[in-house]
Amino acid sequence: MNQQHPHHQEYEEITPKKRNPFYGVLALFTAVALFLLSLQGYFYLMHPEPVNIPKLSEVQEFLPSNLDNPFTSHRADDLEIVMEESSDTIKQVANYIAANSCKKADRVCQSKALFYFVRDNIQYVPDEKFHDQLENPITVLKTGGADCEDMAVLLLALEKSIGNSVQLVYVPSHAFAQISIPKYKSEKWLNLEATCDTCQFNELPDSSALARKTYYQL
């Protein structure tokens, strides 16, 4: 006669469940997302976005009130003269915008602040006939309006005053700015289209991106 041990229990064999591949994919996706967020956070700490960019009325306080010829126009081949004659005032304006928009002295942040200042504060006034004339950057700041070429020259003057390399880019019936920031993105040229109120830093509308270009480095 067989007797079972009083403490012995029989157990049914449990077949292990197959692992659902969905959870593996979800775990991988979560890991990648966390990595990208940390990378974005690291980039933000390196190059924070500008905040509290000054309004035009704030920087107009720095402009001289007794210009001999405050609305002088210049020929397009006098770009260096146009920028040089207002360089001291433009540098003061650029430093004010950069210091108030960026919590630390970061060149990328400062460059973005200058671009967004021009894009958001200077009204684009199209020059349909594309006259071969340039306005002094101080004049543009005084009036608050300019065509594409004058907006680009103002932006280039501001960017150059903080140490960036700059060039003016002509496409058929239009002009925009390009800058190169030391030790950033291999110092390649970055597009600044201030007449496009929806364009971000280093973004061009297709009409300019695909057009034939002529470059004028300053």
Image (cartoon, rainbow, N blue to C red):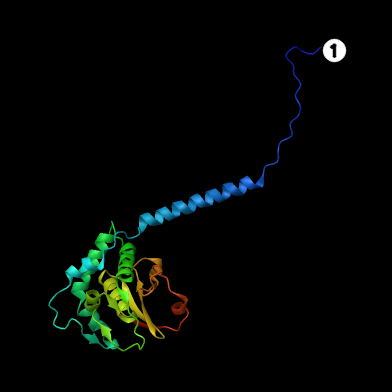
* x then y, percent, for residue 151: 31, 77
Q: Quadrant of residue 92?
A: bottom left
Question: Residue visible at 49% across and 51% down?
Answer: 35
Question: Residue visible at 85% across and 12% down?
Answer: 2
Along the line of sight, the residue nearer the viewer: 113 or 80: 113
Q: Residue furthest right?
A: 1
* x then y, percent, for residue 204: 43, 73
Could you tell me the amino acid type at mark 1?
Answer: Asn
Q: Secondary structure at mark 1?
A: loop
Identify the image quadrant of the C terminus. Answer: bottom left
Q: Left of 100 or right of it: where is 49?
A: right
Q: Quadrant of residue 173?
A: bottom left
* x then y, percent, for residue 72: 21, 85
* x then y, percent, for residue 191: 39, 73
Question: Residue visible at 51% across and 52% down?
Answer: 33
Q: How many marks?
A: 1
Q: Left of 65 or right of it: where is 196?
A: right
Q: Quadrant of residue 186?
A: bottom left
List the residue tagged with mark 1: 2
Give above or below for 52 relative to 89: above
| Residue 108 appears in the rendering | yes
| Residue 217 appears in the rendering | no
Neighbours of disc 1 within 10 Å: few (<14), some (14-19), many (20+):
few
Q: Residue furthest top?
A: 1
Identify the image quadrant of the N terminus. Answer: top right
Q: Left of 104 or right of it: where is 189?
A: right
